[in-house]
Image (cartoon, rainbow, N blue to C red):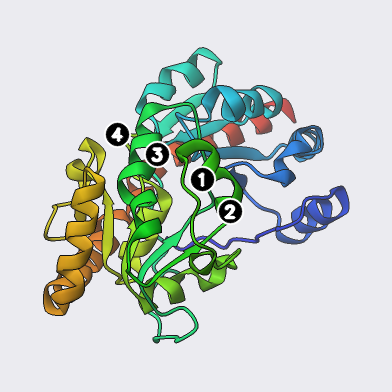
Amino acid sequence: MGHEVYYLNTISKPLMEEAILTYKPDMLFDMGWDIEHWNSDLRTEIVKQHQLFHVYFAEEDYLSYERWSKQYVTATKPDFVLTRSEDCIPKYKEMGIKAAYLDVGIVPEFHRPMPYDSRYACEVSVVDHFSYKPNVFLHKSLSDLIIPLFDQPFDTKIWGKKWNTEAVRYFGKQPPAHLLQGILPFHHTPIVYSSAKINISPQNVFDQISNRTYDILSSGAFLLTSDTPGVRDKLQVGVHCDVSGSPEETIEKISFYLKHENARQKIAKTGMLYARERFSYKNTLQKVWPEIERALQRHHSSVQKDNG
């Protein structure tokens, strides 16, 4: 989109001050939530001091709205919120903050087809920390797609935390030790997707698509995911990916695609081309950017008026 971006991966007052004085940004853009977001007082202080236009992307909405987004927005009072849940837009507006819809998407420069790497080669890959939330659909999604793999002969590799302790706690099944690969550095994820024959991505909710789903598609890899209205709304099953709605269907689909490489590769390629065109941030952000630009201009006018 032609913007110059300066990225800070660590938040501290000296670093933020140096970046602002050096680059003189038009806006501060942050997203999601991690340890760096807990120091919201510092962020609010810097934004106010330098009269910056603050945009926050609530990419965890609606699942984490009450737990995180609402609290963070209340503390920092950004000028504009991008949320991946249309149901959250009126909630932000009730807080006096302009908001618009933006779904999570693809960065094709990062998640792209990579050369085959024997370290990550497998028939079935799962890249996901074990997470259990008190919502029925996530339980079904894991039950359908991942738990059945524990006692199947497929060459399966699972990367992520807590599988060795939490799966048996919530599902009564312990994954065999040889399936568990430990923690995967994020920059290795496209290599795994490109080296595995089938990539599993469970959905957390029935009406949204997870980040990882888009990442797998963008990497030109074959995706098997949950059968949900959200998936079917954005992807064509059997053309861009395939889905499963039961443990039996998961085993059946994996067995089929391991035997039919041409079908698997055709779907992977078609899914990649479609996803990159439809869901890359470069394309989706352009649709909402004019609204942000108008809010930015109003912010500049207000600052000029306040400064005389």
Disc 2 on helix, strand or loop? Answer: helix
Q: CA distance from mark 3 to mark 1?
A: 16 Å
Q: CA distance from mark 1 to mark 2?
A: 7 Å
- Is 122 or 276 nearer to us in this picture? 122
- Is 95 or 122 nearer to us in this picture? 122
Q: Amino acid at mark 3?
A: Asn
- Name the residue that disc number 2 marks: 164
Looking at the rendering, in which quadrant would you find the N terminus?
bottom left
Disc 1 on helix, strand or loop? Answer: helix
Q: CA distance from mark 2 to mark 3?
A: 20 Å
- Name the residue that disc number 3 marks: 204
User: Do callouts 1 and 2 mark residues in contact (Cβ within 8 Å)?
Assistant: yes
Residue 265 rendering spot, x and y as whole percentages? 19, 75
Q: CA distance from mark 2 to mark 4?
A: 29 Å
Of circles 2 and 3, which is in front? 2
Residue 255 rendering spot, x and y as whole percentages? 19, 66
Residue 83 rendering spot, x and y as whole percentages? 45, 34
Q: Amino acid at mark 2?
A: Asn
Q: Residue at x 25, y 39 (%)?
A: 230
Q: Residue at x 47, y 17 (%)?
A: 91
User: Do callouts 2 and 4 mark residues in contact (Cβ within 8 Å)?
Assistant: no
> Which mark, by number, is residue 207?
4
Q: CA distance from mark 1 to mark 4?
A: 25 Å
Against 272, residue 213 (above or below) is: above
Residue 279 visible, this angle = yes
